[in-house]
Amino acid sequence: MMEQYLDGYAQANGLRDVDTRLKLLLGLGAILISLSSTTPWTPLFIAGTMAMVTLFLAKIPGRLYLTLLLIPLSFSVFSVLVILFVRGGGAPLFIFPVAGISLTVTTGSANLALLLIARTLGGMSSLFFIALSTPMIEIFSFMHSLRLPPAVIDLSMLIYHFIFVLVGEVISIYNAQTIRHGYTSLKRSVHSLAMLGGMLFIRAWRQGEELITAMDARCYDGKLELPGEQKNTRPVLIAYIVSYLAGCGVLSYFSSSLVIF
């Protein structure tokens, strides 16, 4: 399953022994700075540095990292195309005549499109750093140390688990339908998609009942136990992370007026 695949890298990465709190501080801080930046320079710097940390320090395979990064980028490309031709402001850069209609790319739309791509790269690189270097059980344990309500933590754990269960069921059903030529025409595709949705609901219900039965068999009393062990926090790592985030904040401040177009 994808859950076991990603968590396997998180369990065996090069930063496995680093305190979870420090990795969350670095990743979440980089995400906030990327999203708050008004120019693409700082998010691009964060994307490059976080990618280097993930690849060379955490020792995550480059092919896996690139595959994961292409997923959000493919979605952002469509948003960028819409912004380029819909968003106005500034002087015209390019004009594309299409079917008697002039599609214009302005300096304002180009800058906004580049900012969107940069924020996507910076934010997702930071998020993948957390996902590939920190096992989810440690993140849930950290949430427990923050004294969050146990019901919230338990629901988060179950939701996280069932996301991948449902993804696996969808892939299994879709492959079975594809082998039986379920998507060879529009009519067949609509019918197969409806069947997939109905079967997914039934299997999700069944998986939930099986999980409840398994938890009851293990004397579940309404609370999922979590490991409370915390690794030692080295002051030098705290200094590095704080310096890095402060440097990114300074870069964001001084580059706020450096637009490309």
Image (cartoon, rainbow, N blue to C red):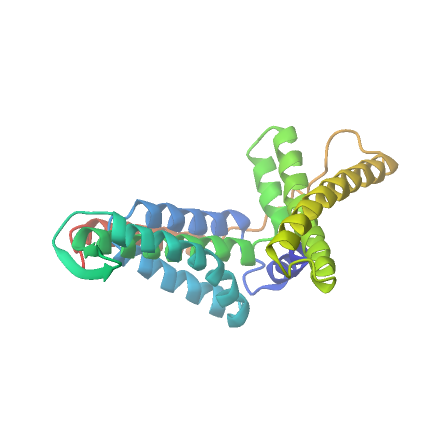
From where the camera sits, is residue 81 visible? Answer: yes
Location of residue 146 by image quarter: top right
User: Residue sitting at 61 percent across and 49 percent down?
Assistant: 136
User: Residue sitting at 60 percent across and 58 percent down?
Assistant: 10
Total residue callouts: 0
Instruction: Report the quarter where the N terminus lies.
Output: bottom right
Front in this rendered view, residue 238 or 109:
109
Instruction: Report the quarter where the C terminus lies.
Output: bottom left
Q: As displayed, is residue 5 above or below residue 213?
A: below
Location of residue 201 by image quarter: top right
How far across and down, in percent of the image, does residue 76 sit?
40, 54
Front in this rendered view, residue 193 or 161:
193
How far across and down, in percent of the image, does residue 25 sit?
44, 47
Locate residue 174 relative to residue 219 in the image: left or right: left
User: Residue sitting at 56 percent across and 65 percent down?
Assistant: 14
How far across and down, in percent of the image, does residue 224 sit?
72, 36
Front in this rendered view, residue 199 or 183:
183
Locate residue 258 relative to residue 65 in the image: left or right: left
From where the camera sits, is residue 61 visible? Answer: no
Q: As displayed, is residue 90 above or below residue 96?
A: above
Identity of the residue furthest to the left in this view = 91
Identity of the residue furthest to the right in this view = 217
